[in-house]
Amino acid sequence: MPKTVAELMSRDPLVVRPETALSAAIQLLAEHRISGLPVVNEKGDLVGMLSETDLMWQATGVDTPPYIMLLDSVIYLENPQRYERELHKALGQTVGEVMSDRPVVTIAPDKTMSQAAKLMHERKIHRLPVLDSSGNLVGILTRGDIVRAMAAASD
């Protein structure tokens, strides 16, 4: 019988709120040696994910997009909205300012390990928040969880 997400996931994951200070979230990531945190609102609804990738802008800063001047006008050679998003992340002080703003990919606890692995591979994501049928965050599944299950199965 294939393993389910519920059997592999970490239960009751650490979470942060959008208003959490970024420095506090960074401390949580470092202390618990994890690479991402679910972000929940005051009702406990999942509203985003904070990952190490989101934090890289804090360390690297942002390059000004290339542009040319033509008759007192600035013409950007790249999308200036991307620059604004990157700048916002680089200067952000709260989780909500820095977290990924795209829709969070989630999975149900009754799905199989194979279904989860396929979803993670196709979407190029490292962790999947696990939501029960009521939409409550009940766990998190990482690529490492899947690899450990594969290793245990080969013993």
Image: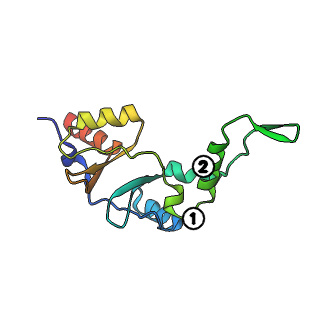
| Quarter of image, res 50 | bottom left
Protein image colouring: rainbow
Q: Which residue is mark 1?
A: 93
State the residue in front, 97 or 119: 97
- Callout 1: SS: loop
**Residue 124 in the image: above or below residue 93:** above
Q: Contact, CB < 8 Å: mark 2 with mark 1? A: no
**In front of the other: label 2 or label 1?**
2
Among numbered discs 2 and 1, the one appearing first in the sequence: 2
State the residue in front, 26 or 106: 106
Where's residue 58, x and y in %? 61, 56
Q: Which residue is mark 2?
A: 85
Looking at the figure, which quarter contains the N terminus? Answer: top left
Q: Residue at x 32, y 59 (%)?
A: 45
Tell me: 68 left or right of 86: right
Tell me: 149 left or right of 31: left
> Quick one: label 2, few (<14), some, or many (20+) residues within 10 Å?
some
Residue 143 has which mark?
A: none
**Residue 22 in the image: above or below residue 142:** below
Q: Amino acid at mark 1?
A: Gln
Can the viewer see residue 105 in this picture? yes
Q: Residue at x 53, y 64 (%)?
A: 94
Can the viewer see residue 155 in this picture? no
Looking at the figure, which quarter contains the C terminus? Answer: top left
- Callout 2: SS: helix
